[in-house]
Amino acid sequence: MPAPERLPAPGVNTTGEREELLAKGELTVVGRISGASNAVLLCTVEYGSVRADCVYKPVKGERPLWDFPDGNLARREVAAYLVSEATGWGLVPPTVLRDGPYGEGMVQQWIAADGADGADGADGADGLLALVEGEEAGEGWKPVALADVGEGRTALLVHADDPRLRRLAVLDAVINNGDRKGGHLLAAPDGRLYGIDHGVTFHVEDKLRTLLWGWAGEPLTDEAREVLTGLERQLAAGGRLATRLAELITPAELAAVRARVSRLRRTGVHPEPSGQWPAIPWPPV
């Protein structure tokens, strides 16, 4: 009997095929990814003649969060994927909610980040984030904040002025991402950029914490405005996205998503830190 074919990188197969593989395939746990605050299991998933690597985060392995008392992190991860797909940008790897060896959890296709040498893909942000001396970001970079680098010295944290990152900044504003760290940015060998780890999203209060503040206060691109218009339509009562999100997050959280999209369209600019919540995630990687 021939060995199952390893699934090519995202973009080769259709999204529907990849979702079907993740949702219906047989999950086999290979190991646990260290360093994560919740249980993160590296698995293979096999369906028919296709096999792929994936990440499985069982709900049973989640640590309760006092400020996210409703639902669970796994469902928020799936909700973030659905919003990403609705934008047409494909910024989140295919993600599904399903039963697994340790019960219900989210299963997400593994992305082999270009240049990553660790299981958690922490080096996937190479070339996208940097620390520079002085107070000028330099051409092609956007300033974020001054960082303490020890021995009384500071450096300027910057991120690339990259359209892929800018799209991700818009997505984070929509889903209210409370934890956009450098290690959550994965640059794939095919040139695509992915964001992962979206468990702390969709809160009704402003929780946006990110390393992608470089465009704060700047006008949104025409592309982003068009995407937001489409999202507003899909989030309307009875819309397909609204219906699917209602299965994953609370009614209040769904209303908050609609309000954020409406506000972004109305203001036409990237959001700025509120000042009521730490703007930078810790640790930043």
Image (cartoon, rainbow, N blue to C red):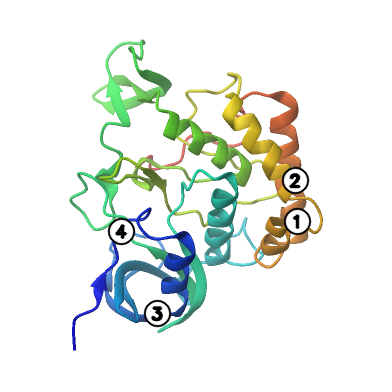
**Residue type at tag 4:** Gly
Label 4 belongs to which residue? Answer: 35
Q: Which one is in front in this view, the residue at disc 4 or the one at disc 1?
A: 1
Residue 275 in the image: state x and y as whole percent: 62, 29
Could you classify mark 1 by the number of other residues whose Cα lies within 10 Å: few (under 14), some (14-19), or many (20 or more)? some
Q: Which residue bears the numbered disc 2?
A: 233
Q: Identify the residue at horizontal 44%, vertical 29% (top origin).
A: 163
For the residues labelled 3 and 1, the Cα–Cα distance comes to: 29 Å
Pick the front one: 90 or 5: 5
* Residue 209, position as x, y percentages in the image: 52, 39
Residue 115 relative to residue 19: left or right: left
Which residue was labeled with disc 1?
A: 239
Residue type of the residue flagged with mark 1: Gly
Instruction: Please report contact status of discs 2 and 1: CB closer than 8 Å, yes or no.
Output: yes
CA–CA distance in space, label 3 to label 2 = 33 Å
- Determine which residue is flagged by label 3: 25
Q: Earlier in the sequence, mark 3 or mark 4?
A: 3
